[in-house]
Amino acid sequence: MIETSQITFSSTQDKGPMDGITVIDLTQIYNGPYATFLAAMAGARVIKVEPPGGEHLRKRSARSGAALPFALLNANKEAITLNLKSQEGRRLLLQLVDSADVLVENFAPGVMDRLGLDQRTIRQRNPRIVYASGSGYGQTGPYRSYPAMDLTVQAMSGVMSITGLADGPPLKAGPAICDFFGGVHLYGAIATALLGRERTGMGRSVEVSMLEAVYHSLSSSLGMLYEAGAEGAMRTGNRHGGMSLAPYNVYGTADGHIAIICNNDEHWQALVGVMDRTDLLEDPRFVTMRARVANIDVLDALIEDWSAQRSKSRLFEALIAARVPCAPIRTLNEMTNDPHLHERGMLQSFKHPEFGDITAAHSPLRFLDTPMVPLRASPRLGEHTDSVLGGLLGYDGAQIRIFREQGAV
């Protein structure tokens, strides 16, 4: 367990590729905070601006662990409070904009306009800034004003229509895929805009909608739609979304489940070798991928009859040794204690000042010429208000106290 006091930034010779970039982070919940987390872990200085009561994710209290995601998505950031509904709070934000490289927000479209902090105003103030907006459906279009959360975008995008069993109801994907697909694409847009600024000297405005970010992930199912038309069965359970690969499923074992995929004939040949059923190679029902897909029910039953008699770990070892793509179905508890991810530094356990002993995740982006930036605990609400307003804007303690009395911070 790493103590919080040990979690510090790496030395100056080991700076990340975004070192020297200052990001003003107005984001909340998952979508925007993940984009700015990626920037922070790449070395950017990320100043998280929250209303005096804190952003929505920080305030979740339905369960003891409901606010833990805040710690995961806001590590290595500084936190200040500004009341953007007050004139003085908006003035302070605009002063921060003067020396910033990026401003990121994921409010509902129109909110920044009503605050007088729209992209035109911000970029007139600082022409070099990258103004980045994340939203559910985009800043324009007929869906612009629809309330957007991961669940609603999963529904609107078609994700739920293809999730679940063919004879069951639509289901949401377990992870918040639309939020995080949107966040990854938002980070990509920011990084791309910064690259453009290096060439032109000018910033730009970028936006990413969750609806559009998730679309390409539907590729397999879109292929089936193209072939089978609107009446084709879209929900395929654990089978391939395009119903073009077999075997491709989750199979029961004596003590759990295992996922097995055969993308080609070589994988199939290796699988039947492990099964000691090389006779299946001559069976006309399974001799080609097309034949295996056409006889998928028989094939799946045959494999599960075999797998159900064996332990999950033994199956995994044997199939991996034969280079058959497979994996045991693991729990979240197994995932958070995964030795591979801990050895690589992706997962790190430490004592958080608010949440106690937690396992936090690093950025999945690796910059191999630079040591990984150590994780720093997510900040308390307003923890860095004085240091940012004092160090970056030059206000003394007396003036900051006045800001507090005015309700600006």
Image (tube, rainbow, N blue to C red):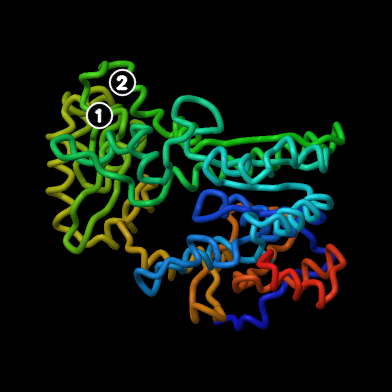
Q: Secondary structure at mark 1?
A: loop
Q: Give the amino acid at mark 1.
A: Met
Name the residue at 82% across, 77% down. 398
Question: Which residue matches tag 1?
Answer: 234
Look at mark 2 in the image and give the residue it sits on: 225
Give the CA distance from mark 2 to mark 1. Answer: 8 Å
Q: Residue at x 65, y 65 (%)?
A: 81
Residue 347: image location, x then y, percent: 53, 66
Q: Is residue 89 left or right of residue 283?
A: right
Quarter of image, res 160: top left
- Other-residue count near label 2 (Cα within 10 Å), few / some / many at <14 / 14–19 / ≥20: some
SS state under label 2: helix
Q: Residues within 10 Å of mark 1 (few under 14, many from 20)?
A: many
Q: Position of residue 139 (x, y in %)?
A: 56, 32
Q: Identify whether 352 is placed above or below 237.
A: below
The kind of residue on which mark 2 rests is Leu
Residue 385 seen:
yes
* Residue 359 horizontal side relative to residue 86, left or right: left
Q: Quadrant of the N terminus?
A: bottom right
